[in-house]
C-alpha cells in the first residue's frame, strides 16, 4: 500500500515537472524540486529524459547536490557529474557522511578526488581510507566510522555532560557503544536509559550486551538479514579482535534491501539495476544484445528438437497447434519455482539441509498441478479435435513437463550459485531452455510413439 502511494506521488510530481518544463516556467520547477527530499529528487531525476534532467539538476539547491548523487544509479550519477565543474563537485561531497562519500568517491574524476581528500581533516581522511580498504558489499564498506563511545567505568552524569559538550549526535543514534581501554566492543546503552536513570548510576549497570556485533567482512546481504531479523536501527561493526570500527544504520540497510529487490527484478531480464532508463541507444543496444543472443542460441536448441519431429508434424497438423501450450505452461510453472528459489537463496533460507525437502515438495505440487491442468487441457483438446488419444498424450506431456519445470526451478539456481554465477541473472535463460526443450521433446515424442506408429 505504502509503495503504491509512493509511486502515485512520484508520477504526480513527474507530471507537474514535465508540464512546467514544457511551458518554460522554471520558477515553479525550482520551488517543487526544493520541497523534496534528496531521495525523492534522485528518483525524479532518474525518471526524466536527459534534456529535462539537465535542466532540473541545475535547479537543485547546491546544499542537496551530494545527497542527491548518493540516491541515483551509477549511470545517472555519471551524467550528473558530467554537468558539474570540479569545484562544484568538491563542495557537493565534502559534507557527506564517510559511508556515503565512500559510495561516491570511485565515480569521481581523479583530480576531484585529490581535492576532496585535501579538503578533509586528517581524521576523516584516515576514516575514508579505512572504509575504502574493505571490499564492496561488505559491512566494512557500509559502516560509518563516526560513532559515539563511552567507557564502562563512568556514570550517567559523566556521559550526559560529555554529550552536551559534543553538541550533536550522528544521525540515527539510538544507542551509545561501550568500549574497553583497548577500544574493544563491550555492549551498548540506549539513550532512553541515560535519560531515565539517576545521574550517579554506573554505566556498567546499564550495558546491554545481548546485541551481537557485525563482523567487518560480513556480506551486505547478511547485514540486511540481521537488521530485518532483529529490528535494529543501528549496529556496531568490529574486526577480528572485537575492536569497534564503526556502525551501520537502518538507512543504509533500506538501500541494500531496495537494491536487492531491483536486482532480482531486472536480472531476470538480463538488465542491471544501475542502468539509466534513458541511457543512449548504442549503450542499451550493446548491453541487451548479449542476453538476447544467448536466448537466440537456446531457441535454436529448442527448434532443433522440433525439427527432429518434422515428419510427425506433417502427418498430424494438430501437433503444431498444441505444442506451444506444453512448453509455455512448463515455462510459467518453472518461473514460479525459480522466483521462490532466488528469493530463498538471497535470504539464506535455502541450503544443503533443506533442498531435498524443498525439491520433494515442489515435485508434488507440480504433479498435482499437472494432473489437474492436464485433465482440463485433455478435455479441451478432445472437444476441439475429437481425438481421445491426442487428449491423453497432451495431458500426459503437460504433467511430465511440469515435473521437469519444478526440478529445474529448484536445481538450476542452486547449481548456478554453487558455480559462482548469479541465479537471478542466468537462471531464467537456462530454465526456459529446459522447459521449452523438454516440452517439445515429451509432447512430440509421445505423439510419435502413440499416435503415429
Image: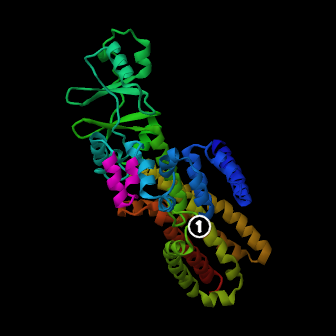
Residue 292 position (above or below residue 182): below
Q: Nearer the viewer, residue 207 or 6?
A: 6
> For the point 44% across and 19% down, which residue is it?
192
Residue 107 x/y as whole percent: 40, 58
Residue 236 x/y as whole percent: 35, 35
Residue highlighted by disc 1:
331
Q: Would residue 392 be found to the left or right of residue 133 on screen?
A: right
> For the point 68% across and 44% down, which residue is it?
5
Q: Quadrant of the N terminus?
A: top right
Residue 444 x/y as whole percent: 60, 80
Residue 35: quadrant of the picture? top right
Q: Secondary structure at mark 1?
A: helix
Q: Quadrant of the C terminus?
A: bottom right
Q: Is residue 323 visible?
A: yes
Q: Is residue 363 visible?
A: no
- Judged by its main secondary structure, the magenta piece is helix
Indicate yes or no whether the magenta region holds residue 172.
Answer: no
Residue 248: quadrant of the picture? top left
Q: Would residue 277 be found to the left or right of residue 321 on screen?
A: left
Residue 103 position (above or below residue 111): above
What residue range appears in magenta? 101-119
> For the point 50% across and 44% down, which residue is it?
63
Residue 109 x/y as whole percent: 38, 60
Q: Nearer the viewer, residue 315 or 63?
A: 63
Amino acid at each position: 500500500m505504502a509503495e503504491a502511494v509512493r509511486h502515485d506521488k512520484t508520477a504526480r510530481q513527474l507530471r507537474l515537472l514535465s508540464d512546467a518544463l514544457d511551458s518554460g516556467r522554471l520558477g515553479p520547477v525550482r520551488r517543487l524540486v526544493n520541497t523534496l527530499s534528496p531521495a525523492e529528487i534522485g528518483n525524479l531525476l532518474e525518471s526524466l529524459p536527459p534534456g529535462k534532467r539537465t535542466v532540473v539538476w541545475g535547479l537543485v539547491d547546491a546544499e542537496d547536490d551530494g545527497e542527491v548523487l548518493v540516491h541515483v544509479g551509477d549511470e545517472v550519477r555519471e551524467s550528473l557529474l558530467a554537468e558539474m565543474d570540479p569545484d562544484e563537485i568538491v563542495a557537493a561531497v565534502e559534507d557527506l557522511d564517510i559511508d556515503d562519500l565512500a559510495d561516491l568517491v570511485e565515480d569521481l574524476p581523479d583530480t576531484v578526488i585529490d581535492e576532496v581528500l585535501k579538503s578533509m581533516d586528517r581524521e576523516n581522511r584516515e576514516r575514508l581510507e579505512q572504509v575504502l580498504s574493505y571490499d564492496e558489499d561488505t559491512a566494512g564498506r557500509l559502516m560509518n566510522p563516526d560513532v559515539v563511545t563511552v567507557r564502562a567505568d563512568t556514570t550517567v552524569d559523566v556521559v550526559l555532560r560529555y554529550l552536551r559538550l559534543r553538541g550533536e549526535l550522528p544521525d540515527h543514534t539510538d544507542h551509545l557503544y561501550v568500549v574497553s581501554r583497548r577500544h574493544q566492543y563491550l555492549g551498548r546503552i540506549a539513550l532512553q536509559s541515560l535519560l531515565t536513570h539517576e545521574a550517579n548510576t554506573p554505566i556498567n549497570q546499564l550495558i546491554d550486551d545481548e546485541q551481537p556485533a557485525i563482523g567487518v567482512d560480513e556480506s551486505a546481504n547478511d547485514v540486511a538479514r540481521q537488521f530485518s531479523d532483529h529490528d535494529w536501527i543501528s549496529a556496531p561493526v568490529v574486526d577480528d579482535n572485537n575492536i569497534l570500527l564503526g556502525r551501520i544504520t537502518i538507512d543504509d540497510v533500506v538501500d541494500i534491501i531496495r537494491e536487492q529487490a531491483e536486482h532480482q527484478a531486472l536480472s531476470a531480464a538480463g538488465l542491471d539495476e544501475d542502468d539509466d532508463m534513458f541511457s543512449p541507444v548504442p549503450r542499451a543496444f550493446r548491453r541487451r544484445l548479449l542476453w538476447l543472443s544467448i536466448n537466440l542460441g537456446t531457441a535454436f536448441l529448442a527448434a532443433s528438437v522440433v525439427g527432429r519431429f518434422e515428419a510427425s508434424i506433417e502427418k498430424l497438423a494438430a501437433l503444431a497447434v498444441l505444442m506451444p501450450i506444453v512448453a509455455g505452461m512448463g515455462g510459467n510453472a518453472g518461473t514460479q519455482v525459480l522466483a521462490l528459489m532466488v528469493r530463498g537463496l538471497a535470504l539464506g533460507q535455502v541450503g544443503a539441509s533443506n533442498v531435498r525437502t524443498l525439491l520433494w515438495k515442489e515435485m508434488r505440487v507440480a504433479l498435482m498441478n499437472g494432473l489437474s491442468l492436464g485433465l482440463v487441457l485433455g478435455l479441451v483438446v478432445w472437444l476441439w479435435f475429437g481425438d481421445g488419444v491426442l487428449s491423453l498424450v497432451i495431458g500426459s506431456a503437460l504433467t511430465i513437463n511440469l515435473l521437469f519445470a519444478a526440478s529445474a526451478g529448484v536445481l538450476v539456481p542452486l547449481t548456478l550459485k554453487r558455480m559462482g554465477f548469479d541465479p537471478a541473472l542466468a537462471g531464467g535463460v537456462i530454465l526456459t531452455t529446459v522447459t521449452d526443450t523438454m516440452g517439445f521433446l515429451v509432447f512430440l515424442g509421445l505423439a510419435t510413439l502413440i499416435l503415429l506408429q
